[in-house]
Image: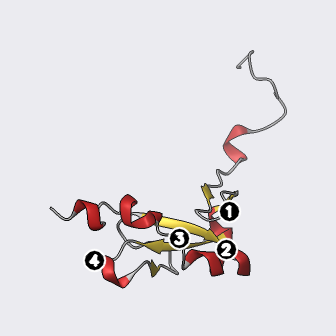
Amino acid sequence: MIKNNPLPDQDMAGTKHVPVRTCVVCRDRKPKADLERYVCPANPEQGLQPDPGKKRPGRGFYTCKSPECAGKLARFRGWRHKCKRGKDNDH
């Protein structure tokens, strides 16, 4: 018996972890299932590529499913630096 358990009636094995991610546009933290994922392209000129299955390898970026964030994603340029393949990093 664990004496330091603050909630002895609660079974810790029954709780499920929910991954949380941050929208790169509005910076809101939401469950991963509520966000859209985009991955870095092989060629930086292509732009971010959608990842509907949220399983593709590589660096990913998440955005809200709201129309405001979807519209601002086209102007989001921070991904070039974070993908490490931007104009400044063409070694």
Mark 1 crowdedness (10 Å alpha carbons): few <14, some 14-19, many ≥20 = few
Q: Is 68 situated left or right of 25 in this image?
A: right
Q: Residue furthest top?
A: 3
Quarter placement of the C terminus: bottom left
- Point 20% across, 65% down: residue: 90
Mark 2 crowdedness (10 Å alpha carbons): few <14, some 14-19, many ≥20 = some
Mark carried by residue 26:
1
C-alpha span from label 2 to label 1: 7 Å
Identify residue for label 2: 69
From the viewer's perspective, is the residue at label 2 or at label 3 nearer?
3
Quarter placement of the N terminus: top right
From the viewer's perspective, is the residue at label 3 or at label 4 nearer?
3
Image spot of residue 41 (x, y percent)? 34, 77
Identify residue for label 3: 76
Q: In which quarter of the image is residue 75?
A: bottom right
**Local secondary structure at mark 3:** loop
Q: Is residue 85 visible?
A: no
Identify residue for label 4: 42
C-alpha span from label 4 to label 1: 26 Å
- Is 34 or 90 nearer to us in this picture? 90
Image spot of residue 50 (x, y percent)? 48, 81
Q: Can residue 36 be seen in this view?
A: yes
C-alpha span from label 3 to label 4: 18 Å
